[in-house]
Image: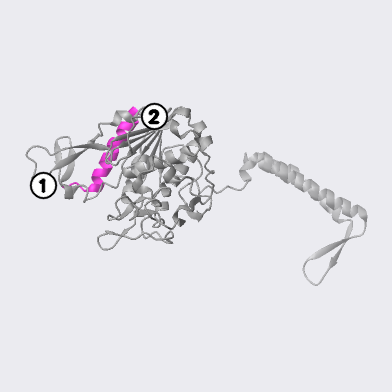
């Protein structure tokens, strides 16, 4: 290749020297107060010759670039989303900022029967609507404008499954409310068992009958199996988490086209050790195992099941990272909802839970896309439920108002899915 380039240089530009001398012979050199020599042409033929020379050089440069593209500038692609063993698009949806957009919100929660009363902040007395007017803008790309009808047509005949805790249920509710704006006959959308949306129920399934679309939610806050305390366990052990066994409802998740997991908010001392819940591996009780280590072991159990069970040719798998909360105070028990997004993250853009999710997914055989929502949520101290829930005596700086932040998770989810297809 190098010899070919050298030969091209010799043939193309080596023979130009006599031609250049001939062109310059039409002019007469004049020195003007310096070391630069300017040429004054005395004939029209000189001008024609210069134009011909420039045209020839431009043509040679064009041919040179076409034949030898390795000499073209390198395009910077530092904005690409980390691949996490998945075929995601070039857009890094999670590096960006929140911008005001008066076209939001995408729906009215009071007109959506699947929006939980506890998340409908406006109906529960919140007066400022500013928190509903923000849209996430990735740094180097655009998220397509949401079009419910178009999405419904493309999702025709599909089954979407959410698995996780109450934050997963919030995203499930959000997606249903978003898509219902594209349905003319609202009665054609219903919960398949006639159940109302509650916090305790383990399964909820909504069918869009006109589009043969199912959107299901399975409550599995740890993803692994809870169990009783072993015989002869210390008195402080009231229950266990079998971190080497996936939840016993796992087979219900298999027959799906899109599968979205989350876990994290229950992996805390207050939800585990203070409740007398400890970790179990086989028959071995792991009293001293840290929560971070147990969470990673549980994720490896989940990953192993996914690698051996899911048909990656059919099912697209996503895992949403830890959702930023905004508790404050010495014991993080104070909840103050702001009127505007925070200008700083206060360290909430990072989470050991999120880091562990990313680490485990990178090593998986089955493609899994990480929805890394932790950084984008870190700014939204204005969008939590606060005291505008169905139980205002208990402030809430973990869950989000609907409409709100979970809608943006779904816009990113849908954009990611459609860009693949």
Crowdedness of circle 2 by 10 Å Cα count: few (<14), some, many (20+)? Answer: many
Across and down, in percent, residue 415 comes to 49, 40
Please tell me whether mark 1 sits on a helix, a strand or a loop.
loop
Q: Are marks 2 and 1 in contact (CB under 8 Å)?
A: no
**What main secondary structure does the magenta stretch of the protein show?**
helix
Across and down, in percent, residue 62 comes to 72, 44
Is 372 drawn above or below residue 420 in the view shown? Answer: below
How far is mark 2 from mark 1, CA to CA? 40 Å
Q: Is residue 296 magenta?
A: yes
Side of 55 where 395 appears, left or right: left
Crowdedness of circle 1 by 10 Å Cα count: few (<14), some, many (20+)? Answer: few
* Sooner in the amino-acid sequence: mark 2 or mark 1: 1
Q: Is residue 183 magenta?
A: no
Image-quadrant location for residue 128: bottom left
Q: Residue at x 51, y 55 (%)?
A: 100
Front-most of residues 6 and 277: 277
Please tell me whether mark 2 sits on a helix, a strand or a loop.
loop
Image-quadrant location for residue 338: bottom left
Q: Which mark is residue 236?
A: 1
Is 359 drawn above or below residue 214 in the view shown? Answer: below
Q: Is residue 51 in view from this perspective?
A: yes
Q: Which residues are magenta?
A: 288-309
Q: Residue at x 77, y 48 (%)?
A: 57
Across and down, in percent, residue 388 comes to 35, 54
């Amino acid at each position: 290749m190098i010899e070919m380039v050298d030969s091209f240089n010799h043939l193309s530009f080596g023979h130009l020297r006599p031609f250049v001398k001939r062109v310059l012979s039409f002019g007469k050199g004049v020195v003007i107060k310096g070391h630069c020599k300017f040429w004054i042409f005395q004939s029209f033929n000189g001008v024609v010759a210069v134009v011909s020379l420039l045209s020839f050089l431009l043509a040679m440069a064009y041919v040179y670039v076409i034949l030898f593209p390795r000499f073209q500038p390198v395009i910077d692609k530092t904005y690409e989303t980390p691949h996490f063993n998945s075929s995601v698009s070039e857009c890094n949806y999670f590096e960006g900022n929140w911008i005001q957009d008066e076209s939001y919100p995408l729906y009215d929660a009071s007109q959506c029967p699947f929006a939980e009363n506890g998340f409908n902040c406006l109906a529960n007395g919140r007066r400022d609507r500013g928190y509903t007017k923000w849209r996430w803008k990735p740094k180097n790309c655009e998220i397509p404008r949401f079009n419910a009808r178009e999405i419904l047509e493309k999702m025709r005949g599909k089954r979407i499954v959410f698995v996780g805790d109450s934050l997963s249920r919030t995203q499930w509710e959000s997606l249903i409310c978003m898509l219902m704006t594209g349905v003319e006959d609202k009665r054609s959308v219903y919960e398949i068992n006639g159940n109302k949306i509650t916090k305790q129920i383990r399964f909820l399934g909504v069918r869009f009958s006109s589009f043969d679309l199912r959107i299901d939610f399975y409550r599995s806050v740890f993803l692994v199996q809870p169990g009783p305390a072993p015989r002869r366990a210390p008195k402080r052990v009231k229950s266990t988490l079998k971190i080497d066994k996936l939840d016993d409802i796992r087979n219900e998740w298999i027959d799906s086209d899109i599968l979205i997991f989350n876990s994290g908010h229950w992996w805390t001392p207050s939800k585990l050790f203070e409740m007398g819940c400890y970790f179990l591996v086989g028959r071995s009780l792991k009293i001293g195992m840290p929560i971070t280590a147990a969470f990673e072991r549980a994720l490896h159990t989940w990953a192993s099941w996914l690698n051996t069970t899911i048909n990656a040719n059919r099912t697209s798998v996503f895992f949403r990272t830890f959702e930023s909360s905004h508790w404050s105070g010495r014991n993080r028990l104070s909840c103050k909802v702001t009127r505007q997004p925070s200008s700083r993250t206060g360290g909430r853009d990072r989470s050991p839970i999120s880091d562990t999710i990313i680490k485990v997914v990178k090593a998986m055989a089955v493609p899994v896309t990480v929805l890394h929502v932790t950084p984008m949520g870190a700014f939204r101290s204005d969008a939590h439920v606060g005291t505008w829930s169905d139980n205002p005596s208990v402030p809430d700086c973990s869950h989000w108002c609907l409409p709100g932040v979970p809608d943006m998770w779904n816009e990113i989810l849908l954009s990611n899915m459609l860009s693949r297809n």
